[in-house]
Image (spheres, rainbow, N blue to C red):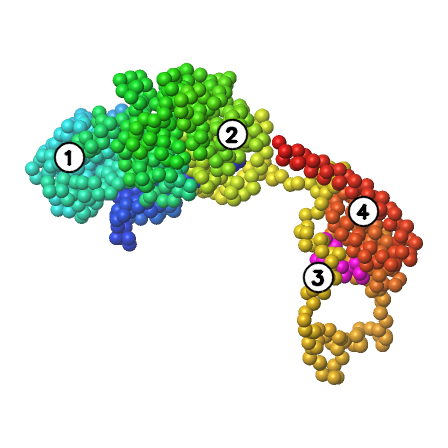
Amino acid sequence: MAQSKIFSKNRALGYVSNHIPLITRYIQRRKENLIVTCVGRAFHTYGCSHFTLLSVSGSHPGDITCLSGDTYHVYTASECNIYAWRRGTELKHTYSGHTSPVHLILPFGPHLLSVDECSSLIVWDIKSQELILEINFNNSIFKITTMLHPSTYINKILLGSEQGQLQLWNIKTSKMIYTFAGWGRAITAMEQAPAIDVIAIGLSDGVIKLHNLKMDSTIFELVQDWGLVTSITFRSDGNPIMATGTTQGHIVFWNLEERKVESQLLHGHFGAVAGIKCLPNEPLIVSSSPDNSLKLWIFDLADGGARLLRIREGHSEPPSFIRFYGEDGNNILSASSDSSLRIFSTITETFNKSLGRASFHRKSSKKKGKLVNDNLIMPPITEFACEKTREKEWDNVAAMHLGLGVVTTWSYDKLKMGEHKILPRRFAKNVNANSSCLCITQCGNFVVIGYNTGHVDRFNIQSGLQGTTYGGEEKAHDGPVRGVTVDPLNQTVVTAGRDAKVKFWPFKPGKSTVPKTILTLSESVKWLRSHRESALISLALDDFSIILIDLDTRRLVRHFHGHTGHLTDATFNPDARWLVTASMDCTIRTWDIPSAQPVDIFQVSEACVSLTFSPTGEFLATTHVCNLGIHLWFNRTLFTHVSLKALPSEYSIPLVTLPGSSVEKSDNIEAVEVDNDVDEDEDEKYASPDQLADDLITMSSLANSRWQNLLNIDVIKKRNKPKEPPKAPEAAPFFLPTIPALDIQFDLSGVKNPEENSKLLVPQNFSQLTSFGKLLQATIETDDYTEVINRLTSLGPSSIDIEIQSLSMDPTHSLEIMLQFMKMIKFMMESNQNFELSQAYLAVFLKVHGEIIQKEKKLWKYLSKLQNIQLNKWSILREKLFYNLSVVQHLKKM
């Protein structure tokens, strides 16, 4: 499966509901009603008691086209298949047989009825998944739009059509019982009324018919002023109230006894009402909408109307700008085209909050009611800046709006829009002046704003009063200002404009109106992003490239090329080693700043419009075109090895699907185990070779404690000598011979072997060589010292000292063994490996056996060979060391 090298899919935030109607289920064991909403390829299950998210289903192969449920299962349709889920997450059954997407599902006792877009009705056995019956309709004659089981009508279903007719069918006999003439308009909703034989039928022109099926007569009809009826439900708590949904987001409550409107919920949703359901025997009604909201209403007003009790909602329009807030990486501040600011928690959706929608006059908007289709609603927020330093004292978020010069302030702590609307006096009557960029200082006291007229102004965010104007009476730039930032110490203000110039201004310019430094670029600047801790500034250019400028040296330090579309956003990782960029070419690229090379590229189906890196380095959050959610990606380098070598020019860019609402193992409905190292074939782990070059000296990887104290091992043993002598062990009985040792060991040398005829035990080998000495003895014939060296490096300092001392214990082989040890040292030096080990071993050898070497001609003659090769290798090592030391000293002086 294609995926990014660095980022792996985590989950999506901010999805609540879409255009698929919700369903409700009462769970006897929980004594609670559950609400199920669709969010694309998955569905969410909420509990009514606290309105919390209980579970998120697995991902479907395509978008869910309809939902239904009974006591045991939730049924979903995706593409041409139907799935049955237990407990919201466990897939139990799959029903395959439709040739077109399914848009209606109805549980019917032990059977399941489904209708696809070609109006093919199929009856399934729920447990065996067998197809029992199939009935095909002609869309031009009878296109099925709704399906209902009338109460007390055994084995019968009622089908509504786009042509306005209704048909009553017996499923058991597969016969049509009756055809209702209808009213010539499409039937959009049907619901069983509390009265037997009565069905409420909603039509496309807003007419609601209360129809008696047994008599085939309309009892009465109602007409809602808002057009098409999207959904119908009845209260079952003893009140004769019927509720209907509209495409404008209103919910109308009808008094069935008086046959008139009881009350209305105007603008209950920003979008159309997708589905409404009255909870059984409770004064509660729940509604969902494509505006990405789920609302629970309670009937407790004096006039019998409903008020909002609980809500779960996200952005009703795709988010346009996001940033992590704070240093813990738990909250994301998001702005959307619906003019709202929201907070999304990466921990749990219950911590999500809304700061409201931007309004020209907040108090007047509240008096008029909901901020929907209101002239007081401000244009969408295009960009914002936030700073946590002063969040408890005054507004700490500043936001720009599309086509406005006014900059609004918001309070993250109070979760509301602030009172200040920042606008320079010079633009009081200039409607063409728009704010184009902004920045809040790290102290939280000032906001610096750039405008499309070329002006740059500084304001006090607490009072909203104007302070310094950079450039004085003249403009800061010839053309729109595209980026502005301030260093952490409030010493320098950096501005970038469409005039391809980057200017560095003193924060408090005084009488001087001239910038301290001006950099002229080859292309116009599109936007600016900064990383305050590292003093790095990234600027997107109109030629689709991005540059980095060092704020301290005021020089261009990096230039990245590769994107083929307009750059939309960029973000630094916490330590400023990576720059992650997004573009309209639908790619997200990660650049390694020290090496100036791309280390990761992946492509998404919808272009990324904004992205931000978590301050903890854990997540990358992205928003995409036509997506209402915020998508989280895990940083894989935190929990697995990832090779960050530069990508080749012919690198094949993988296409990665966006994360779903839950952490998924697979994009397929039949989840399979995915190997974490799925891309190991393309990007194998780098293993350092034993020897980088033949002419270099290589040290060992052993800890210093394994060889550094070899010459002083006798001192260490003396220091660690116990104060009291060891106690003598208890003696064994006198008649049992023992061997002198700390533990009792019996002397069995005199035991006769019954299998041997001889009565004498003759030792086969009188050699006193240790296992290490025997390995050295074996090298006389092979000249291969690899096994001997491995044995020696596996021992501790005390064991190495004992092994070297034991080389002279055997009087018959000691000279040959000692000579072989010297040859082993020569072999280690010639191989240019384990240099420090060979020196330590040689030093101990000479210290212990120095007198013997002086007496034996064969041994002291071989020392001259060791001396020559040692001087040769040390000269190579000394040259490299001195060269590196000189380079370091030179760099320190720069």
Nearer to us: label 1 or label 3: 3
Question: Which one is earlier in the sequence, the residue at label 1 or at label 2?
Answer: 1
Q: Residue furthest bottom?
A: 734
| Rendered view: 505 above or below 232 | above
Q: Earlier in the sequence, mark 1 or mark 3?
A: 1
Q: Position of residue 520 (x, y in %)?
A: 50, 18
Sequence order check: which comes first, mark 4 or mark 2? 2
Q: Is residue 237 left or right of residue 670?
A: left
Q: Which residue was labeled with disc 4?
A: 827
**Start and end of the magenta stretch?**
792-806
Task: Identify the residue position indicated by label 1 in the image.
Answer: 264
**Which marked residue is nearer to the observer: mark 3 or mark 2?**
2
**Along the line of sight, which residue is nearer the eye, 83 or 240?**
240
Pointer 1 local density, CA inside 10 Å: few below 14, some 14–19, many at least 20: some
In this view, the residue farthest toward the right is 857
Distance between the alpha carbons at the discs numbered 3 and 4: 30 Å
Q: Mark number for residue 716? A: 3
- Residue 99, position in %: x, y? 37, 32
Q: Quadrant of residue 418?
A: top left
The mark nearer the N terminus, 3 or 4, is 3
Residue 649 forms part of the magenta stretch: no
